[in-house]
Image (cartoon, grey):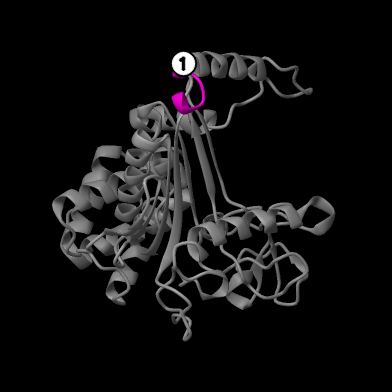
Amino acid sequence: MEQVFPYEHLHAFTRDVFLKIGCTPEHAQLAATVLLSADLRGIDSHGVARLSGYIRLWEAGRINPLPDIRIVHETPSTAVVDGDGGLGLVVAPFAMQVAIEKAKIAGTGWVSVRHSNHFGIAGYHAMMALRHDMIGMAMTNASPLVAPTFATERMLGTNPIAVAIPAATQPAFVADFATTTAANGKLEILQRKEQEAPLGWIQDKNGVPSTNPNELKSGGALLPLGGDREHGSHKGYCLGSVVDIFSAVLSGANYGPWAPPFVSFLPLPPDPVGKGLGHFFGAMRVDAFRPADEFKDHMDTWINRFRNAATAEGHEKVLIPGDPEREMQAERLEAGVPLLGPVVKDLGEIAMKFKIDF
């Protein structure tokens, strides 16, 4: 059963929780905004449903609420940022802003991040570039839950990629997707709803396709985008690998099976190859390639032409990446954010723990 909460209510509550774990007011406000952007955009698996996970990581000493986020290496167009174990919700916007500032000077800016944590939805960070007439990119590695094609071992995370591209009168093009067939949060939602997973999402510990959303708890694994070799899972495996290398091998974070798990009850790998989780960000000034107004006019042409493509029977229109999330955000800002019963229960328990009104 769902309950609906006003966005402002959830934001204030989430901010107060981050204050309780020791974040500065500025960081608590930012972390709440980044986290709730997932709920607003309909990516419920990455919003307040994850708040209890962040709290458990903090309790386990794996999140530093007062990080010294700093640039540890840079060139005119690149940088490496060390997040000092801080919330990825705070570290990532810092790093993306560095990429934007680099792009203002050099035309493009590229930033790799180490020693961070889960950063919410990739789309939030990529979209930071839009207001500067820039194309934004964001990606991150994540807990190893994904078996490469033909493997039974969990070697990669869901490793999302987001790209945000400005337009003139049309809404921005915003692609934000995991490199797996489905993100782990989608399995958590199915578990709460007591529903089965579609074939192609997961496999059991022996590599056999499964529909049990609890399979990961028994040694199973998520599958790369495509699901199996016949449907192109090797391509999803390649995409996830690129994200892992850009985010972690390039920055000095942990990669592959050494990436720290998001859940606090699993131990950290005993032989780390780097520091924390890694992210990668890019910002490209449109006018480094052609006049920004000219480009955005052509983006309008591109978007309009795709919107008006002939549709298959039973479908009203072709969607542009970012359309469903933008429409959902407008709806939820007006009507409120629906939360499943187990999520409401989790938030109630957090409220009791920190003596906050929920």
| As drawn, 357 above or below 9 | below
Q: How many marks?
A: 1
Q: Check disc 1 and report its element: helix, strand or loop.
A: loop
Q: Is residue 162 magenta?
A: no
| As drawn, 186 above or below 215 | above
**Extreme bottom residue here?**
270
Locate residue 229 relative to residue 318 in the image: left or right.
right
The residue nearer to you, when weighing 134 against 175, is 134
Instruction: Sort mark 1 into few (<14), some (14-19) or many (20+) by Cα contacts within 10 Å.
Output: some
Q: Tell me residue 185's x, y (percent).
A: 52, 57
Q: Give the residues drawn in magenta, as a range.
A: 286-293
Locate residue 57 relative to residue 153 in the image: left or right.
left
Locate residue 39 relative to residue 222 in the image: left or right.
left
The residue nearer to you, when weighing 121 against 191, is 121
Q: Tell me residue 181's x, y (percent).
A: 66, 53
Q: Is residue 288 visible?
A: yes
* Residue 113, picture quadrant: bottom left
Q: Main secondary structure of the magenta part?
A: helix
The residue nearer to you, when weighing 130 against 209, is 130
Please name the residue that numbered disc 1 is placed on.
168
Q: Tell me residue 117's x, y (percent).
A: 38, 63
Q: Is residue 117 visible?
A: no
The residue nearer to you, when weighing 123 against 185, is 123
**Residue drawn at (32%, 73%) of the image:** 62
Q: Tell me residue 341's x, y (percent).
A: 41, 54
Locate residue 83 relative to residue 187 in the image: left or right.
left
**Residue drawn at (34%, 35%) of the image:** 105
Q: Is residue 292 magenta?
A: yes
Check disc 1 and give the amino acid type.
Ala
* Residue 203, picture quadrant: bottom right
